[in-house]
Image (tube, rainbow, N blue to C red):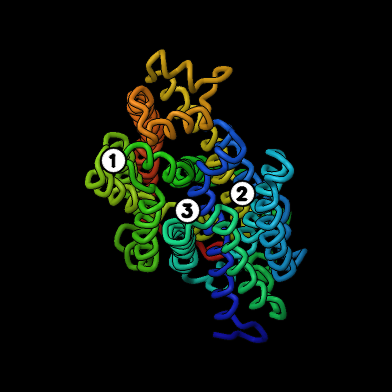
Amino acid sequence: MAQGSYNYNKLFIASCIALVTTAMAFSIRADILKELGATFDISHEQQGLVNLMGIWGFPIAILIVGPLVNTFGMGRLLKFACLGHILGIVFTILSPNYGFVALLLSTLLVGLANGTVEAVINPLAATMYPNDKTHKLNVLHAWWPGGLIIGGLATFALAEFMNASWQVRLGTIIVPALIYGAMIWTEKFPETERAASGVSMGEMFMQILRPGVLLLILCMCMTAITELGPDQWVGSVLTDTVGIRGILFLVYTSGLMFVLRLVAGPVARVFTPIGLLAVCAAFAAVGLYLLSVSFTAGAAFLAATVFGIGKAYFWPTMLGVVSERYPRGGEFLLAVMGAAGMIAAGVAGPSMGRIYDLHTIEKLTPEVRQLVVVDGRYSPERAQEIIQKAQAGDPVAQQQKAALDEALRYGAAMTFRYVAILPLILVFLFGAQYFYYRARGGYQAVNISGH
């Protein structure tokens, strides 16, 4: 569909591919995290710091450029994001030559590109489809799990069938970056809905002081931790709890999310967007608890199904609600929501890693603890030495490996159990909002003119 001099259909597809690029960066980093741990000899907490840098780049970028996307121009910003993706991946591949700090900085650059993409595509979608925001934002963000699937399958296939290094697998992210860059390089972009409607930037900024907006920001933090916190660790955690590549579970739950988000419009009409969020929170709480007690592939598959349904609608529906209920907040409120979610998820990354380490160390036998704990931190390199000796047939090492596996299984499970508390709280917060709107005639989208 083209409107005026703008090719809305092409811009929407390019936005979807840009989101695929950010998601691939996320899922491939989740899969190679253990290898990064071995390459740089870093603990689970330090691995969480790598995730933190990737995620913190997002709110830094979105808070700086998000409110100013109309000033800078959405097309110009998306071009910068494309260049950031390509350079960030190249520098990450080269980082072993320069040390752990180089890994952190290159990961930050990718995060900045991810945040710039999010800063542009959300107000762009809201501008192009003002009467169907929740549905279109869900369709757009279906390509987040879509990208997780593409990245997950790519890294799995390259590792399993071609024995490709983590550098080769990470390099596949450059492909979609080149595609969306080529699609948008010569295209014209519209003004944001807020600017086109004549709402001043001053009024846009003042919208954040409204109590309903502040409550939604709080909810966004908790939904983001619930969705993205476990996703950062699912590859590592399920490898320890179930004994198979956890990235396959990320691919599976992402498949559920992809399908469910494509049909978000009819589902949201049945439950209303707020009611849908309450239902999702209940599923997510149950799913996370089940993941914490699932130690077989079948049980983990069932738990992942429940969790996948639960987290499916969180991010795009939260964006849809704030855009529909507070449209005069425009690109600023969308940027704040995205930034709040990623900041919360970023803090959750190393926090979950700390829980992982602490409970693993707690469960270790004194003998094995002396071998794998260095300066109070769990050392993947020391653990790998035990595993290699056990694989070589050393009977003592095999006993040590069994104790290590049990401790890792316990530590991994506890990371999910702690996070399960948040969606339980969200059930009550979203439920209260649902009944608030119901008492006032039901949830309704607000026209940007105020009606």
**Real-space Cα separation, disc 2 to disc 3, in angstroms:** 13 Å
| Residue at far right of view | 72
Q: Quadrant of residue 214?
A: top right
- Residue 409 position within the rendered picture, expressed as x and y whole percent measured from the top left: 35, 31
The relative height of residue 15 versus residue 288 in the rendered view (above or below) is: below
Could one spot residue 188 in this view of the protein?
Answer: yes
Q: Nearer the viewer, residue 451 or 23?
A: 23
Q: Which disc is residue 439 wearing?
A: none
Q: Which disc is residue 286 wearing?
A: 1
**Real-space Cα separation, disc 3 to disc 1, in angstroms:** 19 Å
The relative height of residue 432 versus residue 92 in the rendered view (above or below) is: above
- Residue 100 position within the rendered picture, expressed as x and y whole percent measured from the top left: 68, 38
Q: Nearer the viewer, mark 1 or mark 2?
A: 1
Q: Nearer the viewer, mark 2 or mark 3?
A: 3
The relative height of residue 335 versus residue 355 in the rendered view (above or below) is: below
Q: Residues within 10 Å of mark 3 (few under 14, many from 20)?
A: many
Q: Nearer the viewer, residue 67 or 28?
A: 28
Secondary structure under tag 3 reads helix
Residue at x-position 56% and y-position 67%: 126
Residue behind mark 3: 315
Earlier sequence position, callout 3 versus callout 1: 1
- Residue 40 position within the rendered picture, expressed as x and y whole percent measured from the top left: 62, 37
Secondary structure under tag 1 reads helix
Q: Residues within 10 Å of mark 2 (few under 14, many from 20)?
A: many
Earlier sequence position, callout 1 versus callout 2: 1
Earlier sequence position, callout 2 versus callout 3: 3
Residue at x-position 39% and y-position 30%: 408
Q: Nearer the viewer, residue 226 or 322?
A: 226
Q: Which disc is residue 336 wearing?
A: 2
